């Protein structure tokens, strides 16, 4: 651990490259990238720097649906044993399409899926559990995590990138990974443009306690303002991701607890008994943001820095883990072959691998959100027929489960649970 800290100071005296990889952003994507590379190549010096002050990550009350492929990767990286006791398997999923005032919500589509015997297609995991496990693994591998210090700028040279941190220190590395989230400053500093769509929607996220067990069932209700997802957590608890127009979402999270619970109950119903909201609900603005390039000399974007998508399919983080697995495989193979891990032609292999899949998922979530976030009668009729048809096609359902599990397409080794 001291190794990277010393390297940071010495680099300020322009002693040349001290790190091989510097990751900007200690979210799940940044941490997983650092762990994946160092796990496979202990000879590479890797450090992570994050703008948020120490301990902020522990205050994230959200939970994420982690697809089967990402679970395999976390197991391979030595994190899953710590996460598993806190992970809830999703054993079944139902989809409805109705209005909040409808007395009954007919189920149009059901999935119950395992990708292999005993392996569910996804688990729900609290974000802080996931982040904590990745941090502990990073510490075991001697990866230094520098917190409360933002990357303020960088200059790219022929053999390294000089990264300027907010505390005045300059770190030299062969490769800079930008995992600094959807509003990535590093992406902007590199002059990489984005394709942007503002949905005017926000996702209200909260955890609820209910009287009766959910039995591992996830529900997605397509309501006129957008999807309302009920995702099972361990115990008699569920995570809610509730899409509303941004003004309504802000009004709801600022409202009195009683008003919020009544509005929630109207959408959730009483099938699981009395509901109680745990903690304070929060609203997250939703949009589509796709980077026009994923790489520049000595720079690779990963996770939301490369693509922010609507949570309608619960795939944002899973796409990020796919980036990590592909980037780590590209970098590790280049290093084994004695190539420069920050060279543009090496990084372009990663870009070619990830761009199509990402654009496809961005476009799919965009279309789904536009199709389902409205109450236009003829469109409702068409989409309900579509859902009903899919429900009668076992092959089609298998295809969707495979997509949701993250095991479709050209899957990087880590996502298959294999070493790099
Ligand atoms: C309402 C909602 C529900 C969601 N549900 C799901 C789900 O169920 N499943 C799923 O797969 N995905 C889900 N997502 C998406 C998922 O949360 C994101 O894709 C994921 O958090 C992205 O991780 P990241 O590490 O790329 O970025 P972030 O988690 O945003 O992390 C970025 C990090 O970079 C740091 N940083 C920022 N600027 C700098 C700087 N200049 N220098 C250094 N560090 C910096 C920040 O402090 C932060 O720690 C959801 C998203 C929303 C909004």
Image (cartoon, rainbow, N blue to C red):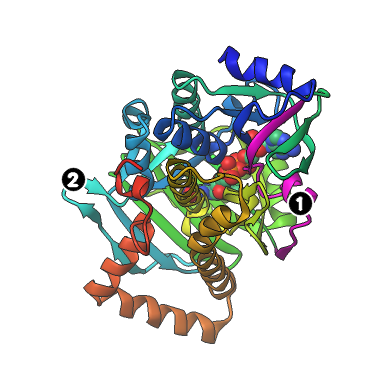
Q: Is residue 25 visible?
A: no
Residue at far front of view: 338
Q: Quadrant of residue 20?
A: top right
- The question of residue 183 being in magenta is answered with yes
Q: Is residue 409 on the magenta stretch?
A: no
Q: Is residue 208 above or below residue 1?
A: below
Where residue 380 appears, as percent x and y from the top left, is 50, 80
Give the image quarter of residue 14: top right
Q: Cβ of disc 1 within 8 Å of ligand 1?
A: no
Q: Is residue 252 above or below residue 307?
A: above
Of the pair 202 and 39, the residue shown nearer to us: 39
Could you say which is closer to the camera, residue 108 or residue 359? 359
Residue appearing at x 38%, y 53% in the figure:
412
Quickly name the residue at label 2: 118
Residue 11 is situated, as x and y percent measured from the top left of the image, at 73, 23
The stretch in magenta equals 170-198
Q: Secondary structure at mark 1?
A: loop
Residue 262 tag number: none
The answer to whether any part of residue 300 appears in the image is: yes
For label 2, being within 8 Å of ligand 1 is answered no
Along the viewing direction, whichever of 52 and 353 lies nearer the viewer? 353
């Amino acid at each position: 651990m001291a190794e990277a800290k010393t390297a940071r100071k010495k680099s300020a005296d322009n002693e040349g490259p001290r790190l091989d990889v510097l990751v900007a952003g200690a979210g799940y994507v940044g941490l997983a990238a650092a762990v994946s590379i160092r796990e496979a190549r202990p000879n590479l010096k890797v450090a992570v720097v994050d703008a948020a002050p120490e301990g902020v990550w522990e205050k994230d009350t959200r939970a994420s649906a982690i697809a089967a492929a990402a679970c395999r990767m976390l197991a391979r990286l030595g994190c899953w044993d710590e996460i598993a006791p806190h992970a809830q398997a999703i054993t079944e999923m139902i989809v409805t399409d109705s209005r909040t005032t409808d007395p009954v919500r007919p189920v149009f589509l059901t999935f119950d899926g395992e990708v292999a015997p005993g392996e569910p297609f996804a688990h729900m995991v609290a974000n802080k559990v996931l982040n904590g496990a990745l941090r502990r693994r990073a510490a075991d591998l001697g990866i230094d995590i520098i917190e409360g210090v933002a990357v303020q700028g960088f200059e790219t040279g022929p053999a390294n990138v000089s990264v300027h941190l907010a505390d005045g220190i300059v770190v030299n590395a062969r490769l800079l990974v930008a995992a600094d989230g959807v509003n990535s400053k590093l992406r902007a500093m590199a002059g990489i443009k984005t394709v942007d769509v503002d949905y005017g929607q926000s996702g209200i996220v909260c955890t609820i306690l209910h009287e009766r067990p959910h039995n591992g069932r996830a529900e997605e209700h397509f309501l006129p303002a957008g999807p309302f997802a009920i995702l099972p957590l361990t115990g008699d608890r569920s995570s809610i991701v509730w899409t509303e127009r941004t003004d309504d979402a802000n009004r709801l999270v600022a409202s009195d607890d009683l008003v919020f619970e009544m509005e929630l109950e109207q959408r959730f119903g009483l099938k699981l008994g009395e509901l109680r909201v745990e903690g304070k609900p929060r609203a997250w603005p939703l949009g589509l943001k796709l980077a026009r390039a994923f790489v520049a000399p000595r720079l690779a974007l990963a996770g939301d820095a490369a693509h922010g998508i609507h949570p309608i399919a619960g795939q944002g983080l899973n796409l990020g883990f796919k980036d990590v697995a592909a980037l780590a495989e590209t970098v590790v193979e280049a290093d084994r072959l004695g190539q420069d891990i920050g060279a543009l032609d090496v990084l372009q292999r990663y870009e070619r691998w990830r761009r199509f899949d990402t654009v496809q998922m961005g476009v799919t979530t965009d279309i789904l959100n536009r199709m389902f976030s409205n109450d236009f009668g003829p469109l409702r009729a068409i989409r309900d027929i579509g859902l009903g048809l899919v429900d009668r096609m076992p092959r089609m359902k298998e295809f969707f489960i495979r997509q949701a599990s993250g095991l479709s397409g050209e899957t990087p080794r880590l996502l298959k649970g294999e070493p790099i």
